[in-house]
Amino acid sequence: MEHDDPRARGLLLAEQERIAARVTKLERDIAALTSARRSSVDDDEHDPDGEPLSARWSLLAGLLESARDDARQAADAVRRLDAGAYGVCVACGQPIPAGQLDVRPFRERCVACTP
């Protein structure tokens, strides 16, 4: 892929914005849930009709961790683009097909090398 491919850069920047919005939303959701848990005297852990707050918090925490990992991968992809190595598999050195990069712009491995 070209060293400073404007299309790739645009895809990566759009992906970074999307991920940042997801991280912000999840952080807000966790803060709201934490606040609700502090202010609630209900024993939601034993409520047969509802989802326990701890289960919801655990789900949101996992989603936030995943989103932050995506953010790191997207930043790494921008660094690879800046270094002229974007679109090249970090494992085998072969080009990553453009279609794969369209689906996941921060992909660092080709399908054959993906664990």
Image (tube, rainbow, N blue to C red):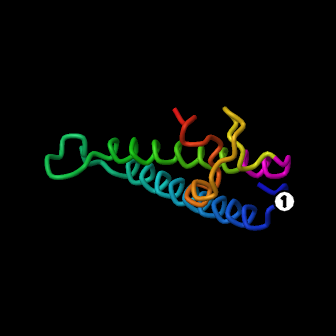
**Residue segment shown in magenta:** 75-84
Q: Which of the two residues, 84 or 28, is positioned nearer the viewer here?
A: 84
Q: Quadrant of the N terminus?
A: bottom right
Q: Which of the two residues, 99 or 105, is positioned nearer the viewer here?
A: 99
Depicted 8 relative to depicted 37: above or below = below
Give the residue drawn at x 85%, y 46%.
83
Q: Which percent across, then down, holds residue 50?
A: 20, 52
- Identified by mark 1, the residue type is Asp
Main SS, magenta residues = helix
Depicted 6 relative to depicted 60: above or below = below
Q: Is residue 61 on the magenta stretch?
A: no
Give the residue drawn at x 66%, y 66%.
14
Q: Which percent across, then down, holds residue 49?
A: 15, 52
Give the residue drawn at x 47%, y 43%.
61
Q: Which percent across, then down, holds residue 77?
A: 72, 49
Q: Residues within 10 Å of mark 1 (few under 14, many from 20)?
A: few
**Residue that numbered label 1 is attached to:** 4
Q: Which percent across, then down, holds residue 2?
A: 81, 57
Left or right of residue 9, residue 31 in this image: left
Left or right of residue 15, residue 9 in this image: right
Left or right of residue 104, residue 6 in this image: right
